Amino acid sequence: MELLLVSIASLFAGFVDSIVGGGGLILVPALFAVFPNTHPATLFGVNKGASIWGTGVATIQYAQRVQMPWRALLPAAAVCFVGSMLGAWTVTVISPDFLRRALPLVLLGVLGYTLARKDLGRHHTPHFSGRQEAMAAATLGATIGFYDGFFGPGTGSFFVFLFVRWLGYDFLHASASAKLLNTTSNLAALMLFALKGHVWWHFALVMAVANVVGSLLGTRLALKHGSGFVRGAFIVVVAALILKTGYDAWWR
């Protein structure tokens, strides 16, 4: 029964994550609810062990239908990997608790800006090209990659928002690019958790199958309906993240 419950949660997480990020909003609380006495690092390891497959498959699906700026994204992915590992190491010496109260306010600003700018992310008009685009993407990858390793909530949504706002991508191209970097940061965290023995592979592998199924469904919807659909999903997910992180920081 436990495996069935977390597999269903993993399917829905893969669906949401493939569109605009935020799958952890579903899967991580489900793992903590089903295994309340388990060490958090083990549950985070199981989450990464399942979700990396969904983000990886989503990246492949997007790459087949969306023109990806590989010359900018591949160096950014490498830097993102290093940033995530560094963030994961930093959390072993510095507590990330100071971010808990700030995160809902940051997300509220992201949501407010997105709602105020009705045209934000509707058209794909990159602000940079060539080396400038690669540098901007690498800066984004290093910063959010470090954040993912150090703290994590909202990583996919931050990737999408910054690709839209800073690099000038539409929401569809931003989501596609975010999936590659999110897969990289997930891989770094998974390697660290696995080396420390914090992954239940017998759970993670079954959940990975469910996550991939959800990811395929979500990616197809995003590709079919385009940037407008992804923008709407982004607004819903960020609003949910605000409620969840706000509750965790201020009321729990």
Image (tube, rainbow, N blue to C red):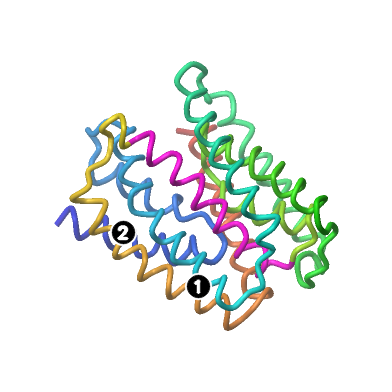
Give the side of residue 61 with respect to residue 45, left or right: right
Q: Which mark is residue 61?
A: 1
Against 16, is 73 above or below? Answer: above
Is 184 a magenta residue?
A: yes
State the residue in front, 192 or 39: 192
Residue at 64% x, 51% y: name it. Answer: 159
Hey, what amino acid is under mark 1?
Gln
Which residue in the structure is indicated by mark 2? 208
Residue at 14% x, 57% y: name it. Answer: 1
- Extreme-right residue of the structure: 127
Against 207, is 33 above or below? Answer: above
Rendered-image quadrant of the C terminus: top left
Callout 2: SS: helix
Against 156, is 90 above or below? Answer: above
Report crowding for label 2: few under 14, some 14 to 19, many 20 or more residues within 10 A (C-alpha). Answer: many
Q: Position of residue 94 (x, y in %)?
A: 52, 18
Chain part drawn in magenta: 170-193
State the residue in front, 131 or 86: 131
Cα–Cα span, label 1 and label 2:
16 Å
